Image (tube, helix red, strand yellow):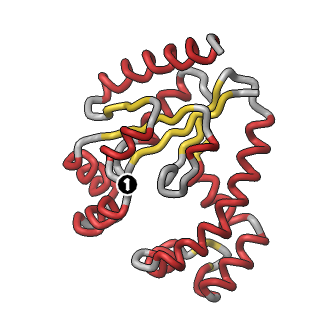
Amino acid sequence: MSKIIGLTGGIGSGKSTVAKMFEKLGVPIYISDEKARFLMENSDVIKKRIVKLFGVNAYHDNSLNRSFIASKVFNNSILLSKLNAIVHPEVKIDFEYWLSKQKSVYVIKEVAILFETNSQSNFDYIISVVAPLKDRVKRIIKRGRQSESDILSIIKNQLPDSDKIKLSDFVIFNDLISNTETEILNLHNKILNKINQL
């Protein structure tokens, strides 16, 4: 079976960009957040449980009312934990099915809150993507969804990069894209060598 590499990093660190670069090298990628969103929109079981937790305003015209849910969980860790308890087990089942279909030496599972959910034991290796704070804030503002104060508040609630670095097997410093591409190619070869030596 394929080895499972966890890919994580704080908001705005560039995890998705890094994941796409690995994908170009032929590594299968599973984006947990994307799957979670898909399941919240398409799983009747999840939809019923979310409506039970948040009320009928959780969905609008059969689509997840993201801004409503975000406003409810933003400063409410209990509600956020309850939402995660609904969605995360279903994502886990979906990932295991996806993994069973893969034939590559290793796969990457992108998980935004890997350490925060104590999921380290689910992975053979963990890669953390880190970037300077000013770059992270700039990237998120560019997406146009949040104010700088909201972004800094989210970053403050996430595990600091210094802790992620200590807990990871590999670290990608994502400041200049050209450097990042070289880093990823080197890391890809390093991972293949490590796995081949097992």
Indicate whether 102 appears above or below 136. Answer: above
Count how many numbered circles sit on residues in the image.
Answer: 1
Rendering coords of residue 33 (x, y %): 56, 54
Q: Residue at x 67, y 69 (%)?
A: 86
Give the structural element (helix, strand or loop) at label 1.
Answer: loop
Residue 14 location (% of width, % of height): 38, 42
- Quadrant for the N terminus in the image: top right
Image coordinates for residue 154, horizontal then vertical, percent = 34, 64
The answer to whether one can see residue 112 in this image is no
Q: Quadrant of the C terminus?
A: top right
Above or below for 74 versus 28:
below
Image position, residue 129 (x, y; %): 39, 38
Residue that appears at 29% across and 40% down: 131
In the displayed structure image, the side of residue 192 where residue 102 appears, left or right: right
Residue 116 appears anywhere in the view: yes
- The vertical placement of 167 against 105, above or below, is below
* Crowd class of label 1 (few under 14; some 14 to 19; many from 20; radius 10 Å): some
Image height check: is 95 above or below 153?
A: above
Q: Identify which amino acid the numbered label 1 is placed on.
A: Leu
Please state which of residues 97 and 44 is positioned toward the viewer in this rendering.
97
Q: Is residue 182 left or right of residue 84?
A: left
The image quarter in which residue 65 lies: bottom right
Q: Furthest residue to the left?
A: 134
Which residue is identified by label 1?
A: 159
Q: Where, by quadrant of the figure, is residue 31 drawn?
A: top right
Of residues 30 and 89, the one nearer the viewer is: 89
Residue occupying the point 52% across, 50% down: 114
Q: Residue at x 72, y 64 (%)?
A: 42
